[in-house]
Image (cartoon, grey):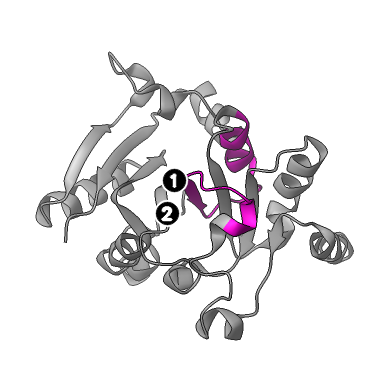
Amino acid sequence: MGSKNKLKRFKENESFKNVIQPSREEVLDGLSIRGEWHSFFGNNNPIILELGCGKGEYSVSLAEKYPEKNFIGVDIKGARFWRGAKTAIENNLENVAFLRTQIELIDSCFGENEISEIWITFPDPQIKYKRTKHRLITRPFLEKYQHILANEGVIHLKTDSEFLHGYLLGLLHEGNHEVLYAHHDIYNSSSPPEEATAIQTFYENQYLEIGKSITYTKFRIKY
């Protein structure tokens, strides 16, 4: 994407009512809307996050499928989720928003028990050992997620990476967390959960076309 196009999208994001772009300092000081996200949506419906939302297609599709819930796509790259934010506005979807911030600051953006569910869809698996701390499912990240999740809140990980799927299962068993569902090839399982297969991203469809397995894990954190 050219720099001019990026700047244009950044500028347009500023005019979107469904985009929140705080500075890092604002987040570190405690985001003003932290703990008050229901007032942003104007209802008390459950709030679901998609972390590393990319172009926002999954967040938008979830919002379309579940109008009784609110969704927030989180990503540091605003030029990417511009597409999702614009689509939501064009389709009059008022139950989806986008937050531009670093995911490691997530507990400064949301209050304790404020979130009902978290979706992590096709994150970078960060396979190299020196990149371990950047995986979105390490113990420090899970602790942050637990802080903002409601008591019975769940996390979904959907990925084409067998490595990341196995890494997560090892982490969950080691910590005695609650695995609600896990499968290494969701579309070839006997009874896949509808919530995991009803929506496919652009890249997910590409993976399926070449016969690549899609893994899915649904779990609760128990610290």
Q: Amino acid at mark 2?
A: Ile
Q: Where on the picture, by quarter, is residue 21?
A: bottom right
Task: Tell me if residue 190 can be seen.
Answer: yes
- Which residue is at the far top? 190
Q: Is residue 47 magenta?
A: yes
CB-based contact (under 8 Å), mark 2 and mark 1: no
Q: State the residue in front, 22 or 208.
A: 22
Residue behind mark 1: 119
Tell me the element at label 1: strand
**On residue 115, which mark appears?**
2
Q: Where on the picture, by quarter, is residue 171?
A: bottom left
In the image, residue 131 lies at what x, y percent? 37, 68
| Picture layout, residue 63 above or below residue 28 | above
| Picture layout, residue 103 above or below residue 209 | below
Residue at 24% x, 51% y: name it.
167
In the image, residue 83 lies at what x, y percent? 75, 47
Question: What crowding class fits label 2: few (fewer than 14 Cα within 10 Å), some (14-19), or many (20 or more)?
Answer: many
Answer with left or right where residue 212 lies relative to residue 172. Answer: right
Q: State the residue in front, 112 or 201.
A: 112
Magenta span: 39-64
- Location of the N terminus (image quadrant): bottom right
- Location of the C terminus (image quadrant): bottom left
Give the CA separation, mark 2 to mark 1: 11 Å
Residue at 81% x, 65% y: name it.
14
Q: Amino acid at mark 1?
A: Trp
Residue at 65% x, 74% y: name it.
22
Q: Is residue 32 magenta?
A: no
